[in-house]
Amino acid sequence: MGMQAPCDNDVSPIRIEVNGIHMGVLQHGDPTGRPALVFIHGFTGCAANWEPFLTDFAQQGMRVVALDMLGHGNSDAPEDPRRYAMEHCQADIIAALQVLGIAAGEAILIGYSMGGRIALYTALAGYFRALVLESVSPGLSTAEEREQRCRSDVALANCIDEFGLEAFVDYWERRPLFDTQSRLPIKKRAGLRQQRLKNSEIGLANSLRGVGTGAQPPLHERLSEITVPVLLITGEDDKKFCQIAVEMAAKMPQAEHHVIPGAGHTTHFEQPALFEVVVRNFFRSVA
């Protein structure tokens, strides 16, 4: 394992080698700052989605790191879908933090949607000081639901292979889950689209196959094992995930749920100022 480029005090894109693959990393702030904030993006996203928060939190004296998961951003896109599985995500994140000099108990892990599912599973390793989960589920509870979702995820991955990335992004942006983004300025939505189009076709397809919701191990019965402080964030217009968060919070010993007004699934994108305040206050409570 090793780093290919040094860190400086600006937002710095680097690639680090962990477990036989390379991961893209953005980091900012005091490299000795503890606890560190570590951000995991959602499906079709990348570390750069968090860049405004990296800058703002770093200006407040925090160390902040954002990771590209496999198939996204500057990370590798292996051809084997099994390399994207949850257990590999967990191992890669912990190995990346060790390369970056962030030891057990020194990081607050923040994940959105797919990144939140990964963060939830990764937190079971006991490596983290606290956890922030934005628009997250613990998976699907029944084998039938998981099998059906697996078929759906694989079919969607096959469509990426057949029709290409742009056609897939067109479909993805029209999903009802993201309807509330229509309230945002066209320029902001266009910027997100351009970021999505920079991802790897094979990477996104294999991410669906390897770490999609259907492939995720269900974690409902393991939520009580996460005894560190947990902040669950949902948008008030995302009723499904608000209810999921209520149910998750009831099973976690130190969980709190915050609903952000005027937002749907992507609270950090739709209401960034409110998202930042909520995360900053949580950081101060667990630092």
Image (cartoon, rainbow, N blue to C red):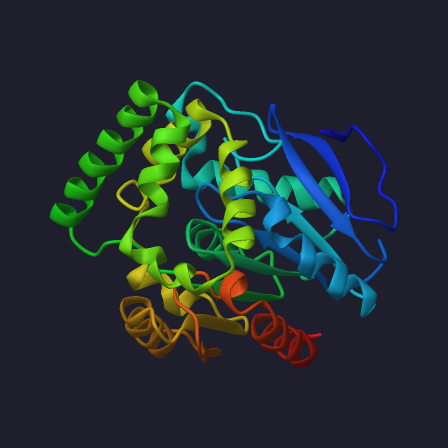
Picture layout, residue 113 above or below residue 226: above
> Residue at point 57% right, 71% down?
275
Q: Is residue 271 visible?
A: yes
Image quarter in which the C terminus is found: bottom right
| Image quarter of residue 284 | bottom right
Q: How many marks?
A: 0
In percent of width and height, residue 262 lies at: 44, 75
In percent of width and height, residue 36 lies at: 72, 60
Question: In the image as oriented, which residue stretches furthest toward the front?
Answer: 186
| Image quarter of residue 177 | bottom left
Image quarter in which the N terminus is found: top right
Q: Is residue 138 visible?
A: no
Residue 85 or 43: which is nearer the viewer?
Answer: 43
Residue 261 or 88: which is nearer the viewer?
Answer: 261
Would you say 161 lies left or right of 279 here?
Answer: left
> Residue at point 65% right, 35% down?
24
Would you say 99 lies left or right of 241 here?
Answer: right
> Residue at point 40% right, 59% down?
182
Would you say 266 lies left or right of 61 here?
Answer: left
Picture layout, residue 215 above or below residue 141: above
In percent of width and height, residue 234 lies at: 42, 71
In percent of width and height, residue 4 lies at: 79, 28
> Residue at point 27% right, 26% down?
159
